[in-house]
Image (cartoon, rainbow, N blue to C red):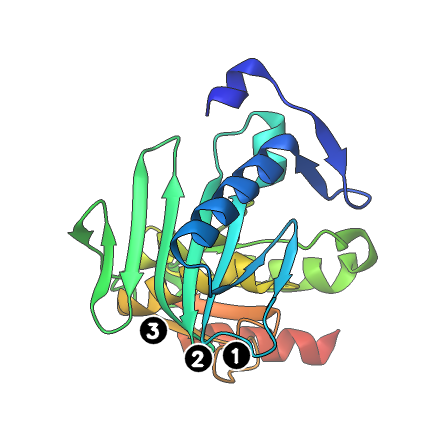
């Protein structure tokens, strides 16, 4: 937050994929804390990669995005967060996502529920797509995939009450957990985008799967998250649209 006032350097990782000094500084800080407190644990993060430094990988892996919503942050749009999850034996067991502009800390622990600043979260009760507020995101190679992405967006726009595009997959998942959104879909994701948020959404009573309806896998790069009640309807829209494109 302080660097928003003092300024920061912005570089490009791709044609429209940005990285700032703040991304790197936050990741280095977090890596330092984890190395100090949990020296035997593995780390996977967006900017500096990851992997085990030991001959045998650890059962424990921290998966995090130091600044999810970098494009928003670089443009001064206050929709961004930091996302952190702890995987044990390949499954996220604890997740935390912090939005510093709203001072909102979303947390989840497997089997123990999801919370916003300590208050329990619950997904919405919306029962149909026509009454649903949905959210999605576009990948950084959107220019190469424009037609199918727009076709999917158009299909949902024609079925739902409204569709939003915020620019932070981690917050999108938290907002499903909080009942602010009824459903979310996106593809070309990375584990650090969704590891914490998917757990929080599930622990709030939501349902998370792949876009093909298969069990959620953070390495699969696509997901649908919903309040559960509109999940099959969302999957049906995706199937029909993909069959046509």
**Residue 111, image x and y in percent?**
23, 74
Mark 3 to mark 1 CA distance (whole Å): 14 Å
Instruction: Name the residue carrying label 1.
Output: 236
Q: Quadrant of residue 117?
A: top left
**Residue corresponding to mark 3:** 228
Give the mark toward the camera: 2 or 3.
2
State the separation of the CA atoms marked 2 and 3.
Answer: 26 Å
Q: Identify the residue under disc 2.
A: 89
Q: Which quadrant is the C terminus positioned in? A: bottom right
Q: Residue 221 vs residue 209: left or right?
A: right
Q: Residue sitting at 77 percent across and 56 percent down?
A: 146
Mark 2 in CB contact with mark 3 (< 8 angstroms): no
Q: Looking at the picture, does residue 191 appear above or below residue 99? A: below
Q: Is residue 198 left or right of residue 103?
A: right
For residue 221, say whether it is visible. yes
Determine which quarter of the picture holds residue 187. Answer: bottom right
Mark 3 and mark 1 in contact? Answer it, CB < 8 Å. Answer: no
- Left or right: 109 in relation to 61: left
Looking at the image, residue 143 sits to the left or right of residue 138; the answer is right
| Image position, residue 152 (x, y; %) | 64, 64
Instruction: From this view, report whether residue 155 is shown above or below residue 216.
Output: above
């Amino acid at each position: 937050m302080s660097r928003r006032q003092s300024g920061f350097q912005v570089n490009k990782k791709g044609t429209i994929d940005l990285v700032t000094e703040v991304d790197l500084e936050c990741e280095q800080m977090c890596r330092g804390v984890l190395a100090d407190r949990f020296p035997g644990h593995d780390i996977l993060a967006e900017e500096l990669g990851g992997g085990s430094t030991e001959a045998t990988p650890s059962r424990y892996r921290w998966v995090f995005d130091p600044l999810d919503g970098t494009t928003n942050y670089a443009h001064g749009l206050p929709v961004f967060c930091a996302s952190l999850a702890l995987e044990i034996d390949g499954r996220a067991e604890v997740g935390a996502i912090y939005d510093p502009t709203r001072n909102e800390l979303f947390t989840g622990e497997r089997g123990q529920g999801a919370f916003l600043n300590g208050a329990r979260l619950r997904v919405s009760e919306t029962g149909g797509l026509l009454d649903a507020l949905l959210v999605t995101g576009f990948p950084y190679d959107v220019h190469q995939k424009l037609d199918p992405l727009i076709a999917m967006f158009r299909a949902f726009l024609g079925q739902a009450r409204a569709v939003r595009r915020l620019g932070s997959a981690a917050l999108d998942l938290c907002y499903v957990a909080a009942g602010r959104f009824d459903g979310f879909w996106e593809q070309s994701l990375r584990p650090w985008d969704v590891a914490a948020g998917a757990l929080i959404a599930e622990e709030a009573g939501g349902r998370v799967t792949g876009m093909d309806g298969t069990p959620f896998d953070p390495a699969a790069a696509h997901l649908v998250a919903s309040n559960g009640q509109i999940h099959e309807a969302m999957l049906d829209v995706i199937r029909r649209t993909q069959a046509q494109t």
